[in-house]
């Protein structure tokens, strides 16, 4: 799964990828709050929420969702 996760996250902008990694603790010691991520980027937590929502919307799009389909379906 980690290779598939890396491939899917790589389709996002660097900022979107970093926000999701920090928010969900992917490759981090722990997950971070909107406030913590906002401080890292020097923006408000509301802006981070917007970036996160846009990135998740992109990941739900069929072109990207296909990259994780085999994992979700349990096939190889």
Image: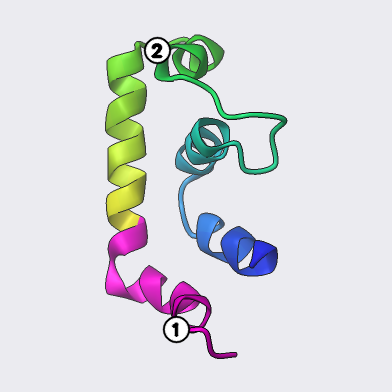
| Residue 29 magenta-highlighted | no
**Going 45% across and 40% down the picture, which residue do you hit?**
16
Disc 1 secondary structure class: helix
Dot 1 surroundings within 10 Å: few (below 14), some, or many (20 or more)? few
**Going 46% across and 19% down the picture, which residue do you hit?**
33
Picture layout, residue 59 above or below residue 33: below
Distance between the alpha carbons at the discs numbered 2 and 1: 38 Å
Q: Nearer the viewer, residue 30 or 53?
A: 30
Magenta segment, which residues?
A: 59-76
Horizontal and vertical percent position of residue 32? 54, 23
Which quarter of the rendering shows the C terminus? bottom right
Q: Is residue 72 left or right of residue 46?
A: right
Horizontal and vertical percent position of residue 47? 30, 21
Name the residue carrying label 2. Answer: 43
Picture layout, residue 38 above or below residue 21: above
- Give the overall secondary structure of the magenta segment: helix
Which quadrant of the structure image shows residue 34?
top left
Q: Is residue 75 left or right of residue 34?
A: right
Horizontal and vertical percent position of residue 70? 50, 84
Q: Nearer the viewer, residue 49 or 73?
A: 73
In the rendered structure, find residue 73 and report the number of the disc placed on it.
1
**Going 48% across and 73% down the picture, which residue do you hit?**
68
Which quarter of the rendering shows the N terminus? bottom right
Dot 2 surroundings within 10 Å: few (below 14), some, or many (20 or more)? few
**Which of label 2 and label 1 is nearer to you?**
1
**Going 60% across and 36% down the picture, which residue do you hit?**
25
| Residue 63 magenta-highlighted | yes
Picture layout, residue 65 above or below residue 23: below
Sooner in the amino-acid sequence: mark 2 or mark 1:
2
Q: Residue furthest front?
A: 74
Disc 2 secondary structure class: loop
């Amino acid at each position: 799964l980690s290779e598939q996760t890396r491939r899917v996250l790589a389709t996002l902008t660097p900022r979107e990828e970093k926000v999701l990694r920090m928010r969900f603790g992917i490759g981090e010691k722990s997950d971070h709050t909107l406030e913590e991520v906002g401080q890292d980027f020097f923006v408000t937590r509301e802006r981070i929420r917007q970036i996160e929502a846009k990135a998740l919307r992109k990941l739900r799009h069929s072109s990207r969702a296909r990259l994780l389909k085999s994992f979700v379906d349990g096939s190889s």
